[in-house]
Image: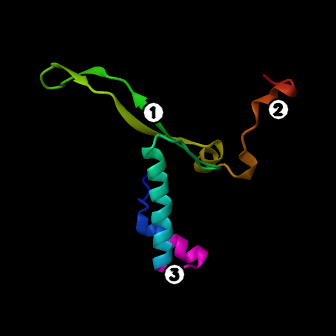
Amino acid sequence: MTGRTVTRADLCEAVYQKVGLSRTESASLVEMVLAEIGDCLERGETVKLSSFGSFVVRGKGQRVGRNPKSGQEVPIPPRRVMVFKPSNILKDRINGGGDDAKPKSRSKAKANGAA
């Protein structure tokens, strides 16, 4: 199953429809939010959006790769990569769970004698 791609314009339209700002103000708001997230990530900060997930910048060290055509070893320089870790709430939503499918805390399960 393939879904459609949501674009900036789609996000702006959703803000326009649901918040009631003008289209220009909605577009400006979406751009400001995305710019702030990008700026934080550029500085190496973690962006955590409650009930959605976290964007984390991680460092990858230098390693040796291999050219698939020639088989020649090539050094891959160190770099930073961004990783998205969805929240348990978002995982449940995309897997069809509703409010009834909330994840149980491990500490509560252990307190009730479950392993």
Q: CA distance from mark 2 to mark 1?
A: 32 Å
CB-based contact (under 8 Å), mark 2 and mark 3: no
Asked whether residue 19 is drawn in magenta, I would say yes
| Amino acid tagged 2 | Lys
- Residue furthest to the bottom in view is 22
- Residue furthest to the right in view is 112
* Tag in front: 2 or 3: 3
Q: How is the image coloured?
A: rainbow
Q: Which residues are magenta?
A: 14-23
Q: Earlier in the sequence, mark 3 or mark 1?
A: 3
Nearer to us in this view, 55 or 110: 55
| Amino acid tagged 1 | Arg
In percent of width and height, residue 37 lies at 49, 53
Query: Label 1 neighbourhood size at 10 Å, few (<14), some (14-19), many (20+)?
Result: some
The answer to whether 50 is drawn above or below residue 70 in the figure is: below
Q: Residue at x 76, y 30 (%)?
A: 106
Report the disc number at residue 115: none
Helix, strand or loop at mark 2: helix
Q: CA distance from mark 3 to mark 1?
A: 38 Å
Q: Which residue is mark 2?
A: 108
Q: Which residue is mark 3?
A: 22
Q: Earlier in the sequence, mark 2 or mark 1?
A: 1
Helix, strand or loop at mark 1: strand
Q: Main secondary structure of the magenta part?
A: helix
Q: Quadrant of the rendered structure where residue 3 is?
A: bottom left
In percent of width and height, residue 76 lies at 26, 26
Q: Which residue is mark 1?
A: 58
The answer to whether 19 is drawn above or below residue 8 in the figure is: below
